[in-house]
Image (cartoon, grey):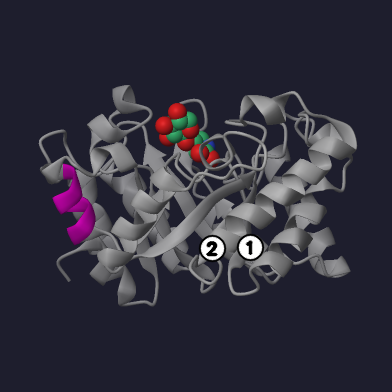
Amino acid sequence: ESTLGAAAAQSGRYFGTAIAANRLSDSTYATIAAREFDSVTAENEMKIDATEPQRGQFNFTAADRVYNWAVQNGKEVRGHTLAWHSQQPGWMQSLSGSALRQAMIDHINGVMAHYKGKIAQWDVVNEAFADGSSGARRDSNLQRTGNDWIEVAFRTARAADPNAKLCYNDYNVENWNWAKTQAMYNMVRDFKSRGVPIDCVGFQSHFNSGSPYDSNFRTTLQNFAALGVDVAVTELDIQGAPAATYANVVNDCLAVERCLGITVWGVRDSDSWRSEQTPLLFNNDGSKKPAYTAVLNAL
Ligand code: XIL
């Protein structure tokens, strides 16, 4: 196969990218994105601050720009993200307690209604666990509404769009030995045992010298899949973009039947949120990096 999307499709998977609405007018960017990928995640446009800038006033202008571009170019869409401690609008940052809990529910309902039946996977909750060795929940205004905020988000989401796969998404959960991985595993196991509606776990996979790729990532994916959820690599970028590491990640996903696909977090290095790490598959001029060829060959 000659593109990442077509190559991934050979095993029934997708290969996606994050898309930024304001880059779609860049023809080099749009040409690569349209050609290579068959799944799209809005890099920022579906986040809480973008979609509900004032309480109860939803704005899907930028989100729809990404969504419509994706659909017009034949791609599926991952929704990102409905409940998160970061990129909250000011009005939400200042809420707490039952008012914040209700605002979260209203937000999930408002955004999911707009895209009902149109989103393959939703990242319902993003980054709810703390870094480090505690295995605790991350402190946040949402966490302070009560430990059940995550399951409430998932139950709300299931009712709002029964056709979307509902994912929990986080970073530094790729290494099986990390406390954060174990904490997330215990949550998913508990949710499955109690019937909380969760369908998938997203592993962001922002690998760098501080949180490097480890070959036990495959074990992590397998162990989560064995709980009865799908898994996905949702925001892949790797510092320096070593071809061998990119190939390892692809092979890890391919080794796990329930691994749905891989999304890289941007197109060219210059599009990356960590552009100084040159972590992506395309050079700034749009040419393919060695990591691109390694991924294509591994798929
Ligand atoms: C990042 C975007 O890439 C940046 O443009 C933005 O300034 C901050 O957010 N985890 C996530 C993503 O779930 O939403 C983040 O995206 C990267 C880390």
Q: Residue at x 48, y 51 (%)?
A: 234
Disc 2 is placed on an element classified as strand
Disc 1 is placed on an element classified as strand
Magenta-highlighted residues: 29-35
Q: Residue at x 63, y 54 (%)?
A: 110
Is residue 221 visible in the rendered image? The answer is no
Q: Residues within 10 Å of mark 2 (few under 14, many from 20)?
A: many
Magenta-colored segment: predominant secondary structure: helix
Distance in Å between CA atoms under marks 1 and 2: 6 Å
In the image, is 189 to the left or to the right of 57? Answer: right
Seen from the viewer's position, the closer of residues 62 and 295 is 62
Query: How far from the left and from the top, in percent, is residue 193?
Result: 85, 68
Is residue 46 visible in the rendered image? The answer is yes
Query: How far from the left and from the top, in percent, is residue 203?
Result: 55, 50
Name the residue tied to disc 1.
166
Query: How far from the left and from the top, in percent, is residue 232?
Result: 51, 59
Query: Is 229 within the magenta?
Result: no
- Residue type at tag 1: Leu
Pick the quarter of the image with the C terminus. Answer: bottom left
Q: Residue at x 25, y 39 (%)?
A: 23
- Residue type at tag 2: Gln
In the rendered view, tell whether residue 64 sits above or below residue 179.
below
In the rendered view, tell whether residue 240 sits above or below residue 17.
above
Seen from the viewer's position, the closer of residues 207 and 177 is 207
Seen from the viewer's position, the closer of residues 108 and 295 is 108
Name the residue tied to disc 2.
121
| Disc 1 and disc 2 in contact, CB within 8 angstroms | yes
User: Which of the 4 image quadrants contains residue 70?
Assistant: bottom left
